[in-house]
Image (spheres, helix red, strand yellow):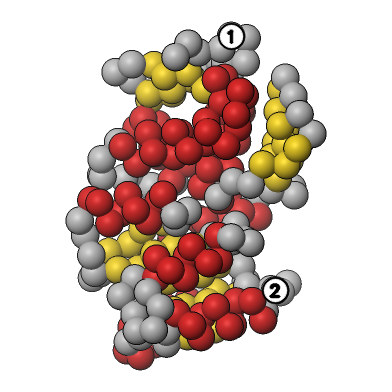
């Protein structure tokens, strides 16, 4: 079986070695870049990378810039690795399409567990890999979404969120439940993380976004039978 390939981007060689050693020990093939420019060169020159672990503070081009460039053409899972812990930085990462956000210092074992979880979700298939609801199509195998036949570009996390909604249509979902199922771990940050993703998802889906209903004081519900009023 071919090993998953992970690009680790950090200007600190000791940090790259730490991450590389733990990932290699768990069967992953690791590529390394010491700055943002080299990361983009490697990424655009190698079409078989499965996941990127990206530091924020780097010379030449920081992590935010690298993420923005990659998101122009790819929805590959991106894990942001950073020493910055302020909430606005975390929200900025999610708004740019970051799928996971891990603050330094961190447990290498937790990092590996996060990597395994995100790759498992990316590669997972099910009996219902193609879901169509009122002109909205979610193709889980191709990782594509269509609205009335037109493809909609979603980030990895937006795709996971939409898939979770359509698979649980008609069910009121609390923010806690959404976090635990979509982010796949107990998240202790602000609930605005979900609200930010839902807002962007609704916008990208256009009129189909009205099928995602706000349940005030609880969370959200995906219900195609009626549109939510403004």
* Residue 172 seen: no
Crowdedness near tag 1: few (<14), some (14–19) or many (≥20) residues, C-alpha within 10 Å: few
Q: Residue furthest left?
A: 86
Q: Where is 52 relative to 75, above or below?
A: below
**Number of other residues with Cα within 10 Å of mark 2, as a class: few under 14, some 14 to 19, many 20 or more:** few
Q: Position of residue 139 (x, y in %)?
A: 73, 40
Residue 106 at x, y = what percent?
27, 68
Instruction: Report x, y in % for residue 213.
Output: 48, 18
| x then y, percent, for residue 172 | 45, 17
**Residue positioned 52% across, 22% down in the render:** 212
Q: Which of 156/204 is in front? A: 204
Assign the C terminus to one quadrant of the image. Answer: top left
C-alpha gap between disc 2 and disc 1? 42 Å
76 lies left or right of 87: right
Q: Is residue 71 above or below residue 12?
A: above
**Rendered image: mark on residue 47:** 2
Q: How many marks?
A: 2
From this view, report whether residue 39 is shown above or below residue 112: below
At 34% from the left and 80% from the top, the residue drawn is 58
Report which residue position mark 1 lands on.
Answer: 226
Residue 19 sits in quarter: bottom left
Q: Looking at the image, which is closer to me, 151 or 13?
A: 151
The answer, for residue 67, to whether it is visible in the render is: yes
> Would residue 83 be found to the left or right of residue 181 on screen?
left
The residue shown at (36%, 30%) is 175
Mark 2 and mark 1 lie on one chain; the one further toward the N terminus is: 2
SS at circle 2: loop
Viewer-nearest residue: 1 or 160: 160
């Amino acid at each position: 079986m071919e090993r998953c390939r992970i690009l680790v981007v950090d200007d600190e060689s000791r940090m790259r070695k730490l991450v590389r050693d733990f990932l290699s020990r768990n069967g992953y093939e690791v590529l390394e870049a010491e700055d943002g420019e080299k990361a983009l060169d490697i990424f655009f020159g190698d079409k078989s990378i499965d996941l990127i672990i990206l530091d924020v503070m780097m010379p030449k081009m920081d992590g935010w810039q690298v993420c923005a460039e990659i998101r122009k053409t790819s929805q590959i899972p991106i894990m942001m690795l950073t020493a910055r812990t302020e909430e606005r930085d975390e929200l900025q990462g999610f708004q740019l399409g970051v799928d996971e956000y891990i603050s330094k210092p961190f447990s290498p074992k937790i990092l590996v567990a996060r990597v395994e979880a995100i790759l498992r979700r990316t590669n997972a298939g099910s009996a219902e890999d193609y879901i169509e609801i009122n002109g909205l199509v979610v193709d889980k195998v191709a990782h594509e979404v269509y609205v009335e036949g037109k493809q909609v570009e979603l980030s990895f996390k937006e795709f996971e969120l939409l898939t979770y909604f359509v698979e649980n249509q008609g069910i009121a979902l609390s923010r806690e439940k959404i976090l635990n199922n979509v982010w796949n771990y107990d998240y202790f940050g602000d609930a605005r993380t979900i609200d930010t993703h839902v807002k962007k998802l609704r916008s990208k889906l256009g009129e189909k976004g009205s099928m995602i209903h706000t349940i005030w004081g609880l969370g959200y519900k995906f219900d195609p039978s009626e549109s939510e009023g403004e």
